[in-house]
Amino acid sequence: MAGKIVYVNVDEGVKRVANNAKLYVTLLNKFKADTNMGLIEDRLGASDFEKAQGAAHTLKGLAANLSLLELFEKVRDLESQIKEKAVPPGALDGVKSAYDETIKKIDEVIAKYG
């Protein structure tokens, strides 16, 4: 049974920063400036699996720490595929889609709580 996709779990994210909503919004803003998604794309395009995996690992950690659930799951799977040097066609597209939706939701959270 498929449930509702959760891009940003605000309650969980705020809990992770000692219930400091202002800090959480600041961290979300910093996340928007992060370049790891572009680095993953660039390095995969150049078949540089080591750097692509490093960028994926960093993005996965950021997503986990900020409770960006869907992005975390997609990047976790992609990181495993990169590690095995077996990224199926369309895998990166799924991550990019989750990333884009996450950014939209982050903007909504910032507008509401920022």
Image (cartoon, rainbow, N blue to C red):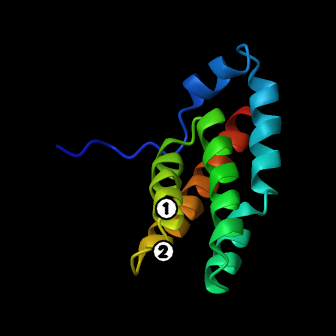
Does residue 114 appear anywhere in the picture?
no
Amino acid beneath label 1 = Leu
Amino acid beneath label 2 = Asp
Picture residue at 48% right of the left edge, 74% below the top: 93
Residue 93's tag is 2
Left or right: residue 48 versus residue 87 is right
- Report crowding for label 1: few under 14, some 14 to 19, many 20 or more residues within 10 A (C-alpha): many
Taking depth in this image into account, of 5 and 48 the one nearest to the observer is 48
Picture residue at 49% right of the left edge, 61% below the top: 78
Q: Quadrant of the N terminus?
A: top left
Q: Residue furthest left?
A: 1
x, y percent for residue 61: 65, 42
Question: What residue is pinned by disc 1?
Answer: 78
Q: Quadrant of residue 56?
A: bottom right
Q: Is residue 47 above or below residue 27?
A: below
Picture residue at 43% right of the left edge, 73% below the top: 86
Q: Residue furthest bottom?
A: 46
Taking depth in this image into account, of 47 and 95 the one nearest to the observer is 47
Which badge, 2 or 1, comes first in the chain's sequence?
1
Do the residues under discs 2 and 1 have CB atoms within 8 angstroms? no
